Every structure is written in structure tokens, then in C-alpha cells.
Image: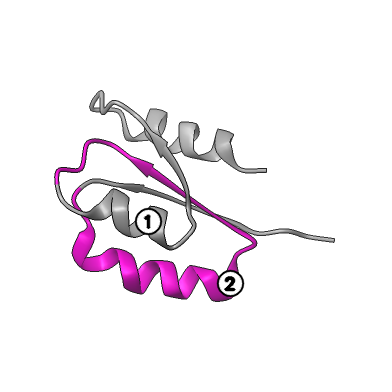
Amino acid sequence: MIRISACVIVKNEEKNMVRWLDCMAQLADEIIVVDTGSTDATVKIAEAAGARMFFFTWCDDFAAAKNFALEQAT
């Protein structure tokens, strides 16, 4: 059986998280959120929705952050 993992890298996306999480909940088997240093409610919103939360220290390398997110997918 094919499983779908939705992975996203975020920073201060509280205004968009609920909408994205609601959409992904209909499509994906697992939701992975990688936070790169949010100072707003992004993390709390993702955790409340049941997303698997991970943290990545931003190093000005989008590929590194995306690869980290993909490594978390099962």
C-alpha cells in the first residue's frame, strides 16, 4: 500500500498553518512540520493538529532543511 507523507518547512506561518494542516489531513497519512525558528504560534498550532514536529536550525540552506524534513518521513 502506498502511504503519503506531507512535509513542510516553516517559520512564523501561524496565519497559514490551520488551512494547510486541514488540507493535508485529507490527503496524507502523516504530516511532518519542520520549524526553523518560529516566534509565533506556528508550533502550537501544528502540535495541536497532531503533526509530527521537528526542529531545524536555519543555516541559509533550503536544501538542507528540506532534506532533513524528508528524512523524517516514514
The percent coordinates of residue 6 (x first, y second) are 53, 56
Q: Pick the quarter of the image with the N terminus.
A: bottom right
The percent coordinates of residue 5 (x first, y second) are 60, 54
**Residue found at x 30% / y 53%:** 44
- In the rendered view, does 21 fall on the left or right side of 16? right
> Which residue is identified by label 2?
27
45 or 66: nearer the viewer: 45
- In the rendered view, does 3 fall on the left or right side of 5? right
**Residue found at x 37% / y 56%:** 46
From this view, report whether residue 33 is shown above or below residue 49: above
Q: Is residue 14 magenta?
A: yes
- In the rendered view, does 5 fall on the left or right side of 42? right
Q: Is residue 26 magenta?
A: yes
**Residue found at x 33% / y 70%:** 18
Which stretch is magenta? 12-39
Q: Quadrant of residue 65?
A: top left
